[in-house]
């Protein structure tokens, strides 16, 4: 009986030893994987356009991982507030790539919370390199000033000021030529961190992707619209118009917070008639109701385009979306 008891204790000790050994083995292996993961350079991006650009710039570059911050499902990106998960991810990040130009309203808070976080600001890089020559973003600012004068006599002046407090129109990715500049800004910023062998791949990736952007199919719209007048229901499409040489002569920037007066609607419709506008660029979610009114009361047609702000996108999607936008414009003519 005693012999059986000792045998049972011995077998129990052996079992415990085996379990502990196996557990230690997997713990060490998992810990090593974590250390390896920590050795990667984590590049966070602020929104879909710079996320897509960064994916292409870092394609096949070992030792880097790219992660996009949470994207708003509705509303304006300017007013988006970072989630707890976003802040947690930023605490681990080595680099944050942003569109800039006021697009990320939370950027000052991020800089204050993570002063050592390296930030690549594509808008500032382009601005400082004279990449904005010929841009018509001032149209939005002028339009805002006109509204501010008009809204002195309207009750919703406060809403208008809140919506436009981000300043200039920073939706620069909607003009693929400026998006090419953003790609170069990201590549240059990342090459400052990279080893020589990585720099070569990053530079090659940037050139390759810019080559893809240069052959975006405008469906001949750049010839059709050169010098033509258009109206827009979202400020992002000022850059779409610019990319095909059109003049934006009427703007109504709509989103979920935008309250539009009857007088403003009347002025917008009058501008369409007075300027012989045949087409209006809009985003469906917030421009659909106004779009129906435009088509009912004028001869202009409304085309609903994508801004690449909401939804999930991959490395190839910028080219696909912009090509589709031009196709939709051509089909509306």
Image (tube, grey):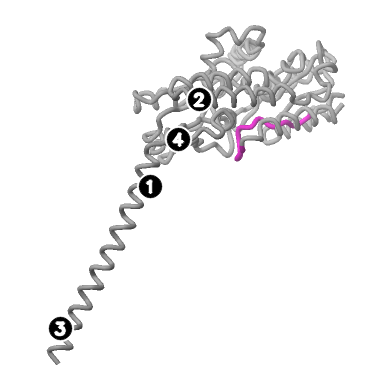
Q: Give the residue pinned by disc 4.
A: 63
Name the front one of labels 2 and 4: 4
The magenta stretch spans which residues?
A: 303-314
Q: Give the residue pinned by disc 1.
A: 33
Q: Give the residue pinned by disc 2.
A: 98
Residue positioned 61% across, 28% down in the render: 258
Work out how far the residue at label 2 is from the one at label 4, CA to CA, in angstroms. Answer: 21 Å
Image quadrant holding the C terminus, namely top right
* Residue 161 or residue 308, whichever sits in front: 308
Disc with the residue nearer the chain's start (2 vs 1): 1
Disc with the residue nearer the chain's start (4 vs 3): 3
Work out how far the residue at label 4 is from the one at label 1, CA to CA, in angstroms. Answer: 13 Å
Work out how far the residue at label 2 is from the one at label 1, CA to CA, in angstroms. Answer: 29 Å
Label pair 2/4, CB-CB below 8 angstroms: no
Q: Secondary structure at mark 3?
A: helix
Q: Estimate the x, y position of residue 208 in percent, counting from the top left.
A: 64, 25
Name the front one of labels 2 and 1: 1
Q: Secondary structure at mark 2?
A: strand
Which mark is on residue 153? none
Q: Give the residue pinned by disc 3.
A: 6
Q: For the residue carrying disc 4, how many other residues have a C-alpha within 10 Å: few (<14), some (14-19), or many (20+)?
A: some
Figure quadrant of residue 291: top right
In the figure, is residue 28 to the left or right of 74? Answer: left
Label pair 2/1, CB-CB below 8 angstroms: no
Which residue reaches farthest bottom? 1
Q: Is residue 162 visible?
A: no
Residue positioned 66% across, 31% down in the render: 318
Image quadrant holding the N terminus, namely bottom left
Work out how far the residue at label 4 is from the one at label 3, CA to CA, in angstroms. Answer: 54 Å
Disc with the residue nearer the chain's start (1 vs 3): 3
């Amino acid at each position: 009986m005693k012999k059986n008891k000792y045998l049972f204790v011995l077998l129990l000790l052996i079992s415990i030893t085996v379990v502990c050994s196996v557990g230690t083995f997997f713990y060490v292996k998992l810990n090593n994987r974590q250390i390896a993961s920590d050795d990667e350079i984590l590049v966070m991006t602020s929104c879909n356009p710079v996320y897509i650009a960064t994916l292409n710039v870092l394609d096949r570059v070992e030792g880097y991982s790219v992660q996009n911050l949470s994207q708003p499902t509705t509303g304006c990106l300017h007013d988006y507030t970072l989630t707890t998960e976003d802040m947690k991810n930023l605490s681990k990040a080595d680099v944050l790539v942003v569109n800039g130009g006021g697009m990320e309203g939370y950027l000052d808070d991020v800089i204050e919370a993570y002063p050592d976080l390296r930030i690549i600001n594509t808008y500032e890089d382009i601005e400082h390199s004279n990449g904005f020559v010929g841009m018509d973003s001032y149209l939005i600012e002028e339009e805002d000033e006109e509204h501010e004068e008009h809204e002195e006599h309207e009750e919703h002046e406060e809403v208008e000021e809140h919506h436009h407090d981000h300043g200039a129109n920073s939706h620069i990715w909607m003009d693929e030529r400026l998006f090419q500049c953003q790609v170069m800004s990201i590549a240059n910023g990342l090459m400052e961190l990279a080893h020589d062998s990585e720099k070569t791949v990053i530079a090659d990736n940037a050139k390759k992707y810019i080559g893809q952007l240069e052959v975006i199919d405008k469906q001949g719209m750049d010839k059709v619209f050169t010098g033509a007048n258009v109206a827009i229901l979202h400020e992002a499409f000022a850059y779409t118009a610019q990319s095909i040489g059109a003049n934006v002569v009427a703007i109504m920037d709509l989103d979920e917070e935008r309250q539009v007066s009857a007088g403003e609607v009347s002025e917008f419709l009058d501008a369409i008639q007075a300027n012989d506008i045949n087409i209006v660029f809009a985003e469906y979610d917030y421009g659909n109701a106004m779009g129906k009114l435009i088509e009912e009361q004028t001869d202009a047609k409304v085309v609903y385009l994508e801004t690449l702000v909401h939804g999930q996108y991959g490395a190839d999607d910028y080219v696909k979306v912009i090509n589709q936008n031009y196709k939709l414009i051509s089909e509306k003519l």
